[in-house]
Image (spheres, grey):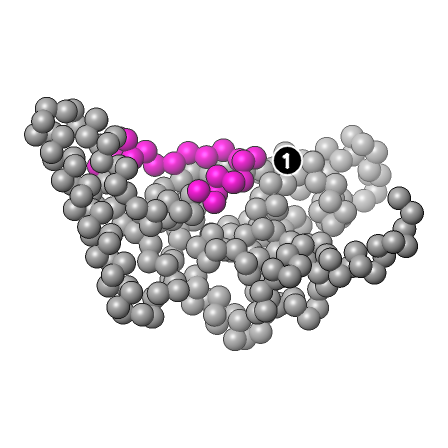
């Protein structure tokens, strides 16, 4: 899927670009496993893959047929910044990865940046209320810090306590290492229309990076519905899902054979 947006209508493409602009999550690839296609193919040949099949064909077969344990030999490390603490909580749900986050114990956070959630972006009144809440948190962070210093606490202790005032919208900074198999799982979940917009932006930007490096692995990866050919979201699938009229739900597929197959 070219730039992973080819399945969308022009309206949906424009909408997605708007969503990406709202957050501006920053993603930089720090390192990745080189010669990954050859590595995967050679690993597969240990199990008896014929030598007359090209390395690229082997990898595409592995991905399409979900013989995916071999993909764990490929690892990517990303620098991810200007994401919210709220997003970082979702990122931690992807446990087969290595997470290193900016420490609020050792950094002075009085000048923290923050994310304004998209649903209120076009409502000046709510945006102003949100900004006031952020500035109030900043003010109280400084007050707690300064009062602790005044009372004789060390800067280390003052930072450690004051950080509890920080809101979920606060920017944080991550270094994230993940193997290709787990990354496909991440993309399948977070490219979905139901995913929170901020982490969906992160998933899209990561996809745009890795598909250029290893198209044999990622060119046919999208949300879970696209990957599986059926949507596990069932009734929860949003009405504006681009696959709603193309890909059936898991529940619908099961209804066609349930009771007809002997257990």
Let me know if residue 100 is in the magenta part. Answer: yes
Q: Which residue is drawn at 47% across and 52% down?
A: 199
Is 242 placed left or right of 148 in the picture?
right
Return the x and y of residue 235 as percentages of the image width and height: 64, 61
Quadrant, the C terminus? top right
Res. 89 visible in picture: yes
Our reading of the magenta stretch's main secondary structure is: loop
Residue at 64% across / 54% down in the picture?
224
Around disc 1, counting alpha carbons within 10 Å, would you say few (fewer than 14), some (14 to 19), or many (20 or more)? some
What secondary structure is marked by label 1?
helix
The answer to whether residue 84 is left or right of residue 247 is left
Query: Residue 150 is drawn in which quadrant?
Result: top left
Q: In which quarter of the image is residue 239?
A: bottom right
Residue under the image location 55 percent in, 61 percent down? 193
Q: Horizontal and vertical percent for residue 16?
A: 48, 66
Is 101 on the left or on the right of 221, as rendered?
left
Q: Does the magenta stretch include residue 94?
A: yes
- The residue lying toward the viewer, choosing from 48 and 225, is 225
243 with respect to 151 (left or right): right
The x, y position of residue 158, in whole percent, is: 19, 30
- The image quadrant that residue 94 belongs to is top right
Give the residues drawn in magenta, as a range.
89-108
Residue at the far left: name it: 150
Residue 47 in the image, given as x and y percentages of width and height: 80, 32
Residue highlighted by disc 1: 72
In the displayed structure, 172 sits above or below 22; it is above
Q: Which residue is drawn at 70% across and 40% down?
A: 68
- In the rendered image, which quarter contains the N terminus? bottom right
């Amino acid at each position: 899927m070219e730039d992973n947006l080819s399945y969308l209508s022009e309206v949906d493409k424009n909408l997605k670009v708007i969503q990406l602009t709202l957050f501006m999550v920053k993603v930089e690839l720090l390192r990745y496993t080189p010669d990954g296609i050859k590595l995967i193919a050679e690993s597969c040949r240990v199990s008896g893959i014929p030598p007359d099949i090209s390395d690229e064909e082997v990898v595409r077969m592995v991905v399409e047929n979900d013989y995916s344990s071999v993909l764990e030999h490929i690892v990517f490390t990303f620098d991810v910044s200007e994401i919210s603490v709220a997003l970082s909580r979702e990122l931690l749900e992807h446990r087969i990865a290595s997470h290193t986050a900016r420490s609020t114990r050792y950094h002075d956070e009085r000048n923290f940046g923050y994310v304004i959630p998209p649903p209120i972006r076009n409502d000046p009144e709510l945006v102003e209320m949100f900004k006031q809440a952020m500035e109030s948190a900043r003010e109280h962070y400084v007050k707690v810090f300064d009062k602790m210093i005044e009372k004789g606490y060390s800067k280390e202790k003052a930072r450690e306590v004051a950080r509890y005032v920080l809101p979920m919208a606060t920017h944080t900074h991550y270094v994230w290492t993940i193997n290709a198999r787990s990354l496909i799982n991440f993309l399948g979940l977070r490219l979905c229309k139901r995913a929170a917009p901020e982490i969906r932006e992160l998933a899209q930007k990561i996809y745009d990076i890795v598909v250029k490096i290893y198209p044999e692995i990622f060119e046919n990866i999208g949300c879970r519905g696209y990957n599986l050919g059926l949507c596990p979201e069932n009734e929860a699938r949003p009405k504006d899902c681009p696959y709603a009229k193309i890909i059936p739900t898991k529940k619908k597929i099961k209804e066609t054979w349930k009771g007809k197959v002997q257990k």
